[in-house]
Amino acid sequence: MNVLILNGPNLNLLGKREPEIYGHETLADIENAIRHRAFDKGVGTDFLQTNHEGVMLDRIHEARGRFDAIVINPAAWSHTSVALLDALKAFEGHVIEVHLSNIHTREAFRHHSYISARAEAVIAGMGSFGYLAAIDFLAR
Ligand code: CA2
């Protein structure tokens, strides 16, 4: 099993701003934890964080036929992007949506995610453990 882990806009700031909402871990810390968990489970990984929606869309297109699953934290694009939903619909593998925070206890505009319509599972509010739970779910 090969899994592509995608992180959307501003997640490069993790651990550097707003630790009360998103925690103290950096994205590099989180990616290392995912890498180790995936290695233990015999799962291959590749990673992308981007602040550019087109870059994210291109990477999803390229993932077709190469990855069995995508684990994605679409960040703010969750709440805005039909284009991201359409790209994920064209991907034939598993899609797991992860949010660090519980988007349902936050501002009303975060309660709806376009991506959830394509996601097999949605994890929100578990912090970085959500990514590890997604790997465990895929590897089971
Ligand atoms: O809870 C999540 O994982 C979110 O996807 C994070 C997004 C937010 O727009 C979603 O509603 C929920 C924001 C990611 C921005 O991350 C930052 C990290 C540190 C400092 C500033 C932003």
Image (spheres, grey):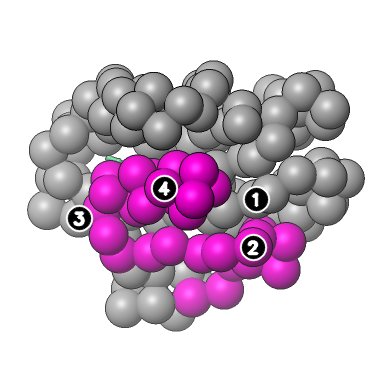
Indicate whether 22 appears above or below 66: below
Q: Is mark 2 within 8 Å of ligand 1?
A: no
Q: CA distance from mark 3 to mark 4?
A: 25 Å
Q: Which residues are magenta?
A: 111-140
Please tell me whether mark 3 or mark 4 is closer to you in this view. Answer: 4
If you read the primary sequence from the N terminus, does the residue marked by circle 3 or circle 4 appear first?
3
Which residue is labeled 4 in the image? 136
Whole-angstrom CA distance, mark 2 to mark 4, is: 14 Å
Per the image, is 117 magenta? yes
Task: Work out whether mark 1 precedes mark 3 in sequence or the reverse, and give the earlier one.
Answer: 3
Magenta includes 107?
no
Task: Return the residue at label 2.
Answer: 120
The quarter holding residue 25 reads top left
Q: Which mark is residue 95?
A: 1
Could you give the CA–CA distance between mark 2 and mark 3, rounded to whole angstroms? 25 Å
Dot 2, how many residues are within 10 Å of its Cα: few (below 14), some (14-19), or many (20+)? few
Q: Identity of the amino acid at label 1?
A: Val
Residue 20 lies left or right of residue 106; in this view the side is left
User: Are dots 1 and 2 in contact, CB under 8 Å?
Assistant: yes
**Gap in Å between the C-alphas at discs 1 and 2?**
6 Å
Please tell me which residue lies in front, 37 or 131: 37
What residue did someone put label 3 on? 21
